[in-house]
Image (cartoon, grey):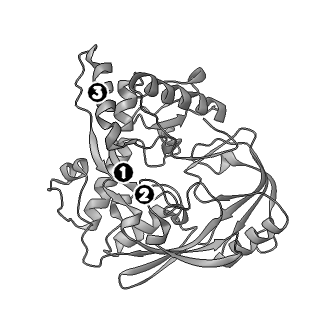
């Protein structure tokens, strides 16, 4: 990898992921420009060497055995703005970018404040939170197509966005280099669409507020759920929400809801299931299902080395001395428990490297 910084041997993935888990990679290098990133990937491909691209490490679960290949840090950073169009380098820290826009009074992405990771990762899984998704502001991406060995530009429409997904998810063929977003310059946020955020701000759904107010409210809500990184808080030693909210097709919805009601009837619990319209069906709350399947906040996995966050049941956390095997055991327990009780399958949101559920 002559175009990247000098590689080191046997880099520990645990040092590069927010879960602080994962075994060694055979080699580590950092590419600090988009062209260096392209060159490094191309050289590895020519050598037949597997490549694991590393952004902020916030969406990775890596096996204890590690990764037998090159761990390549996407290190190209910075952004430029021309009016309402912003072009950002893939390795730029996402929240640093959002914070910078808010400081300029630029709106559109403030409800995605506090999300860890890099800009280049956001279109891959269509990152979203508090009623906002990347897909709503994204204009296009430049990426290196490893199969065609060329740099291509894909528009938002060509990326095939869906709930927490795009055509880039589940494949390493496209290496994101730069991302472009459409923003607003009037100092106001995107319309507030998330009820909890609207209550916090004291506004109605659909209202707009100063971008700085929206950012601070989102950060406050995320901190309360252990979703803002803090090295001293083990509740933030996670990959964020581990399971996506399940989307149930309309043909199955009545049966699924009836099954949930039947399962909870014996306990006398409130069976008003939180549900939200979603493309392709109705979205249910994974956190609600997990809690009512018997997994409370702080529920411990093997030896107490992992647990559900004490603040949010969707986060699986490393309590300090865990292994990836411990984390996966807890994930399986939760997944299987929800399916056994409610007949609903939960699917992991992070990328699993050399491991599976």
- Asked if one can make out residue 4 in the rendered structure from this viewpoint, the answer is no
> Image check: 178 left or right of 127?
right
Q: Report if residue 149 is visible in the image.
A: yes
Name the residue beneath numbered marker 2.
Answer: 162
Q: Nearer the viewer, mark 3 or mark 2?
A: 3
Residue 337 rendering spot, x and y as whole percentages: 47, 24
Identity of the residue furthest to the front in this view: 251
Comparing 259 with 53, the one in front is 259
Residue under label 1: 280
Identify the element where label 2 is drawn.
Answer: loop
Is disc 2 surrounded by few (<14), some (14 to 19) or many (20+) residues within 10 Å?
Answer: some
Helix, strand or loop for disc 1: loop
Q: Are marks 1 and 2 in contact (CB under 8 Å)?
A: yes
x and y, in percent, of residue 131 in the image:
30, 55
For marks 1 and 3, the one nearer the N-term is 3
- Residue that numbered label 3 is attached to: 258
Q: CA distance from mark 1 to mark 3?
A: 20 Å
Residue in the picture at 59% in, 28% down: 329
Q: Residues within 10 Å of mark 1 (few under 14, many from 20)?
A: few
Residue shown at 49% from the left, 55% from the top: 116
Q: Report how far apart the C-alphas of labels 1 and 2 lie in the structure.
A: 9 Å
Q: Residue furthest right?
A: 47
Precedes in sequence: disc 1 or disc 2: 2
**Screen quadrant of the N terminus:** bottom right
């Amino acid at each position: 990898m002559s175009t990247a910084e000098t590689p080191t041997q046997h880099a520990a993935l645990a040092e590069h992921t927010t879960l602080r888990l994962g075994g060694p990679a055979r080699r580590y290098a950092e590419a600090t420009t988009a062209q260096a990133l392209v060159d490094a990937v191309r050289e590895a491909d020519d050598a037949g060497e597997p490549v694991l691209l590393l952004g902020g490490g916030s969406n990775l679960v890596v096996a204890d055995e590690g990764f037998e290949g090159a761990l390549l840090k996407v290190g190209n950073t910075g952004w430029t703005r021309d009016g309402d169009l912003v072009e950002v380098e893939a390795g730029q820290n996402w929240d640093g970018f959002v914070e910078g826009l808010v400081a300029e009074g630029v709106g559109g992405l403030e409800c995605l404040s506090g999300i860890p990771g890099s800009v280049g990762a956001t279109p891959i899984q269509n990152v979203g939170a508090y009623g906002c998704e990347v897909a709503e502001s994204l204009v296009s991406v430049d990426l290196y197509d490893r199969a065609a060995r060329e740099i291509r530009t894909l528009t938002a429409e060509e990326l095939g966005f869906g709930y927490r997904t795009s055509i880039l998810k589940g494949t390493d063929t496209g290496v994101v280099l730069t991302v472009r977003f459409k923003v607003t310059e009037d100092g106001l946020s995107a319309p507030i669409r998330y009820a909890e955020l609207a209550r916090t701000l004291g506004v109605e759904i659909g209202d707009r507020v100063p971008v700085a107010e929206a950012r601070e409210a989102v950060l406050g809500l995320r901190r309360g759920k252990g979703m803002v990184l803090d090295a001293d808080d083990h509740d933030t030693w996670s990959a964020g929400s581990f399971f996506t909210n399940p989307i149930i097709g309309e043909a199955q919805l009545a049966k699924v809801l009836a099954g949930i009601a039947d399962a909870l009837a014996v306990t006398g619990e409130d069976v008003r299931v939180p549900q939200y319209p979603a493309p392709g069906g109705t979205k249910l709350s994974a956190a609600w299902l997990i809690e009512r399947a018997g997994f409370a906040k702080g529920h411990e996995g093997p030896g107490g080395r992992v647990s559900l966050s004490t603040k949010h049941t969707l986060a699986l956390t490393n309590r300090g001395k865990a292994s990836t095997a411990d984390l996966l055991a807890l994930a399986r327990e939760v997944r299987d428990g929800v399916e056994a009780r409610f007949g609903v399958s939960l699917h992991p949101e992070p990328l699993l490297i050399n491991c599976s559920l």
